[in-house]
Every structure is written in C-alpha cells, then in structure tokens.
C-alpha cells in the first residue's frame, strides 16, 4: 500500500477483497442478531437467571427426562465440550442428576431436580419477555418466514432426524 492509502497495481483478487461487503455478510449479521438476543435475555432475567445456552440446555433435559449427553448435543446444537461443561456445572449446583443406563453402563441419563426446575421457572418469564422483544423487531407479516429460514439455516442434514425419545417442541412465531 502506498502512503496515500491506495494500492498500486491492484490485481483482480485484491479488487475482490476491496469490494467484499462486510457490513451485509450473513455470518456477521447472524452473529449480531444472536448477540442482541442474548443481551435481551440478560436484561430481562437479571443476574439470578439462567443465560440463553444454560437455559436451553436445562430445559431440553427437563422436557426430555433421561436424555443422554449425546442426544443433548443434537437437541440443543451445542458442541460436546459445552454440553459436558454445562452438565457438570448443573450437577454441581444440584440442578440435575445422572443415572447409569441399565442396558449400557457407559451411558448416563440426565434428569432435572427440583432445584433445576426452580432455576428454569425463575428464568422462564424473563426469557419469554426477551423473546417477545426480539420478535417485535421483526415485522409481524415476516415472522413466520424469518423463523422458517432460521430453522433451515440451522439444518445440517441431521436436524430433521430427532434422536429416539427426544420431544419436539414447536417455537411460536407470534
């Protein structure tokens, strides 16, 4: 680059880099939307509530008693290390218990305790308010399409195949 900021002898590849529109890059926009959704949840639930990923993980265990960590990875879309860390934290806080699968001693089944249910209940209304605030930013006539597109973007070929015993809960787009 020269002292005036211009690039001498720009070839086609460099011109392509200059023309790339970072402002409207889909990954950037999705990241910003996810960040905003998380901020809204944090505002609504305060310091005492569960943040988005822990809430999503704990409610998945609650709605699917006896789910395995492998199925929890598929259900939540989180990676194995995140699920491992969250389930360890939940167990330490008394939010879940683990029980060995009777047919396969290598597998743990996860169950939410009364303390875990209480943590979910404390976070649920704030999470719902945050979801409503997030959805309100999307024009009413476009919400259904927006969430349909989000679901399609999240599919990876396995998303339409639910693990055995995993309950599907539709997300309201109202």
Image: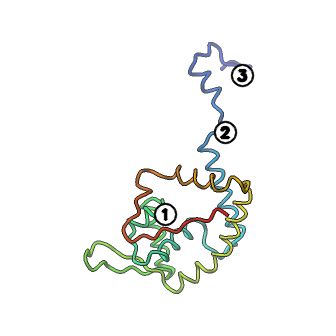
Q: Which residue lies at the image location 60% right of the left edge and 55% below the top edge?
A: 147
Q: CA distance from mark 3 to mark 2?
A: 24 Å
Mark nearer the N terminus (3 vs 2): 3
Residue 62, disc:
none
Residue 12 rendering spot, x and y as whole percentages? 58, 18
Identify whether 119 is placed above or below 12: below
Q: Which residue is at 52% across, 51% downward?
A: 152
Secondary structure, mark 3, is loop
Proximity of marks 3 and 2: CB atoms separated by less than 8 Å: no
* Residue 49 position within the rendered picture, expressed as x and y whole percent measured from the top left: 64, 74
Q: Label 3 crowding class (10 Å Cα cut-off): few <14, some 14-19, many 20+?
A: few
Q: Could you tell me which residue is drawn at 66 percent across and 18 percent down?
A: 7
Q: Which residue is mark 1?
A: 76
What label sits on residue 5 in the rendered view?
A: 3
Q: Quadrant of the C terminus?
A: bottom right
* Residue 35 drawn at (x, y percent): 65, 55
N-terminal-most mark, 1 or 3 = 3
Q: Where is mark 2, residue-wise? A: 24
Q: Tell me the quarter of the image containing the N terminus.
A: top right
Tell whether label 1 touches label 2 (CB within 8 Å). Answer: no
Task: Give the side of residue 105 with respect to residue 108, left or right.
Answer: left
Most foreground residue, 83 or 128: 128
Discs 3/2, front:
2
Tell me: residue 95, above or below residue 165.
below
Label 1 – label 3 distance at C-alpha: 46 Å
**Residue ranking furthest to the bottom:** 114
Judging from the image, what secondary structure is the residue with disc 1 in?
A: helix
Q: Which residue is at 74% across, 56% downward?
A: 137
């Amino acid at each position: 680059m020269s002292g005036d900021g211009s690039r001498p002898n720009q070839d086609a590849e460099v011109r392509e880099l200059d023309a790339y529109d970072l402002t409207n890059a889909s990954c950037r926009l999705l990241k910003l939307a996810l960040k905003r959704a998380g901020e809204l949840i944090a505002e609504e639930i305060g310091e005492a509530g569960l943040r988005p990923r822990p809430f999503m993980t704990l409610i998945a265990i609650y709605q699917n008693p006896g789910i395995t960590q492998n199925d929890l990875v598929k259900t939540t879309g989180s990676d194995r290390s995140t699920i491992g860390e969250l389930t360890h934290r939940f167990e330490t806080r008394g939010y879940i218990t683990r029980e060995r699968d009777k047919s396969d001693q290598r597998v743990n089944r996860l169950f939410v305790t009364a303390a875990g249910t209480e943590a979910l209940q404390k976070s649920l209304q704030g999470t719902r308010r945050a979801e409503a605030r997030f959805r309100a930013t999307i024009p009413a006539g476009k919400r259904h399409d927006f969430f349909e597109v989000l679901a399609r973007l999240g599919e990876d070929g396995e998303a339409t195949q639910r693990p055995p015993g995993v309950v599907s809960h539709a997300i309201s787009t109202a």
